[in-house]
Image (cartoon, rainbow, N blue to C red):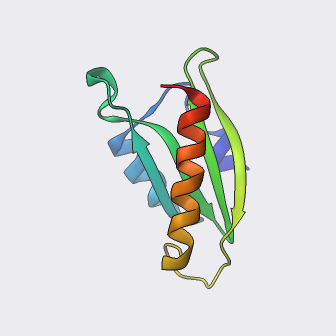
Amino acid sequence: MAIVNSLPARPLLRSEVDSLGEHDRVRGIYPIYGERPELRDAAIVLVVVVGGDAIGLGYRPDAETWERFDTLDVGDDGTKGIHFDDMDRVQALQDEIIAEIEY
């Protein structure tokens, strides 16, 4: 996917997350920002919704790259965002990625 492949080899700044969320193909973006002072304004986990797919991504500092994790089917009703019932699944995916990348 072009959007995912275009991510820089570093965590995304808040302004970059906002810009990504404004992309025509992106229906929603659900970031988690770092807790350490140097990462408080940098997203280390992203769930990006494109069409009916919520794509989980985590930044791996040791490899200096974004890794694609699971993809959830959240349906595509043509609107921005996802259905409220899918938020628990998105949060579970975020938790899974955080545990895996060990920040």
Q: Residue furthest left?
A: 37
Along the horizontal axis of the image, is 38 left or right of 96?
left
Q: Compare residues 48 and 19 and report the one nearer the observer.
A: 48
In this rendering, is residue 93 above or below 67?
A: below
In this rendering, is residue 59 above or below 84?
A: above
The picture quadrant where one finds residue 40 is top left
Residue 41, position in %: x, y? 30, 35
Q: Residue at x 72, y 50 (%)?
A: 70
In this rendering, is residue 87 above or below 59?
A: below
Q: Residue at x 55, y 19 (%)?
A: 61
Q: Compare residues 65 and 69 and report the one nearer the observer.
A: 69
Residue 35, position in %: x, y? 32, 31
Residue 83, position in %: x, y? 53, 79
Q: Residue at x 62, y 39 (%)?
A: 6
Residue 27 visible in image: no
Along the horizontal axis of the image, is 34 left or right of 4?
left
Residue 55, position in %: x, y? 65, 54
